[in-house]
Amino acid sequence: MKIQVAQQPVKTGFSIFGLIWFGQTVSLFGSGLTSFALGVWVYQTTGEVTSYALIALFTVMTTLLLSPVSGALVDRWNYRNVMLASDAASALTALLIAGLFYTGRLELWHIYVSVTANACFAAFQQPAYAALTARLVPSAQLGRASGMVQLGLAVSDLFAPLLAGMLVAQINLSGIFLIDFSTFLFAVATLMLVNIPAQIKPAPAVQTAKWDLPGLLKETRLGWNYVAARMGLLGLLVYLAIANFASGVISSILVPMLLNLTPTETIGLVISIAGSGMLAGSLIVSVWGGPRRRIRGVLIFEMIKGFGIILIGLRPEAWLVAVGATLAHFAIPFSSASNQAIWQTKIPQEMQGRVFAIRQMVSRSITPLAYLLAGPLVDRVFEPMMRAPQGFLGTIGQVVGTGAGRGMGLLFSLMGLIIAVAAISGLFVPSVRNVEED
């Protein structure tokens, strides 16, 4: 049964979205503080890239396992209530970890359990947020809304690492966890303040459906069938999966690579400088709305992002890392906002929870492999290879340098090359290039 959504004034819907967005942005900033501090703590405690990469592995594996049913459930439930429950549960997790650290009982496995729990909550929160945004914001304004979401990410990327680097020495991890707890509470408060229009709710046929697993899987299959029948969307999913694989390797080795290059305080500065690129791109997208041909916005700016990532690993120079990271981060808002707008306009509103969950599951389906491979590749292959006097085949060693951290630099540049080549290839695939018209 198709939902009939009454037209509402642009100002009203966008204003409601703006308040929700502000709360989620504050919460995202708190999570950024925790993520940076935890990553440094785990790597410095264990000295292993593998232990650091396991944080991301547990996160993405949980998302993949829950995605087949989370989207179908989100389509049955009230979107705001899903977001409320997710934010509240994440706040309790942050408070628990703060208590463990403060009492000296925090262990590595506690970190893995906490990130797994938060991934469970996010598996429901993210499809609900995307679907609610599509209901509140008129189609012509979805590019701006997606740009605002990217702006929130940019603010976190710009300020969270810099602030976390300073706060770790002042208030230690327990204080950072308490800040994260308070930001989740702020997000909950903003969600409780907004008045969601009555027509933004699941379809009656969905509300009265049986709550059994076979029924949920059937609804999930309908979401997958919708995507599989449209080659443009399917091709876009394939590209996202490739890009996410490369990004998984990159995220696993970024902090360890920088720790071999510069002090902890400078790492926060470098990451914050990169965040300024994302902030600038997000501000432009928020005002502009993105390219009229959104698929070009996805692929061209993904290509630019790939080139920026190549620069990050090219030489052991902090300034070059900052330049490459700034370029890559500048491109992210354009590609992400364009991609989100494509999906929000091409998918029927009553199916968006299911389809967004399917998109999340498929696009990240090979990311666990990236997290599993990143640690062993660095620890056993690339780092030993690039610590040899002549480096890899001599010539490559002369380009990227030799010594500690240069194996990670080489792997970084290879992942950037994969992203750039895959994006360029997408421009020559008709089904992907014409996804907005087909």
Image: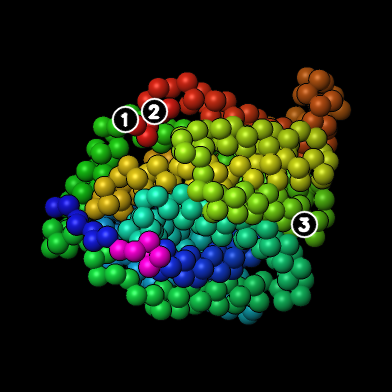
Verify CB contact (< 8 Å) between mark 1 and mark 3: no
In the rendered image, residue 249, in percent from the top left (x then y), is placed at: 59, 40
Q: CA distance from mark 1 to mark 3?
A: 45 Å
Bounds of the magenta span?
Answer: 8-13
Residue of label 3: 269
Look at the numbered disc 1 and give the secondary structure of its residue: loop
In the rendered image, residue 185, in percent from the top left (x then y), is placed at: 49, 77
Verify CB contact (< 8 Å) between mark 3 and mark 2: no
Residue 319 lies left or right of residue 216; in this view the side is right
Q: CA distance from mark 3 to mark 2?
A: 41 Å
Residue 438, which numbered label?
A: 1
Q: Nearer the viewer, residue 400 or 103?
A: 400
Q: Nearer the viewer, mark 3 or mark 2?
A: 2
Q: Residue at x 55, y 44 (%)?
A: 334
Q: Is residue 410 above or below residue 45?
A: above
Query: Tag 2: residue type?
Result: Asn
Look at the numbered disc 2 and give the secondary structure of its residue: loop
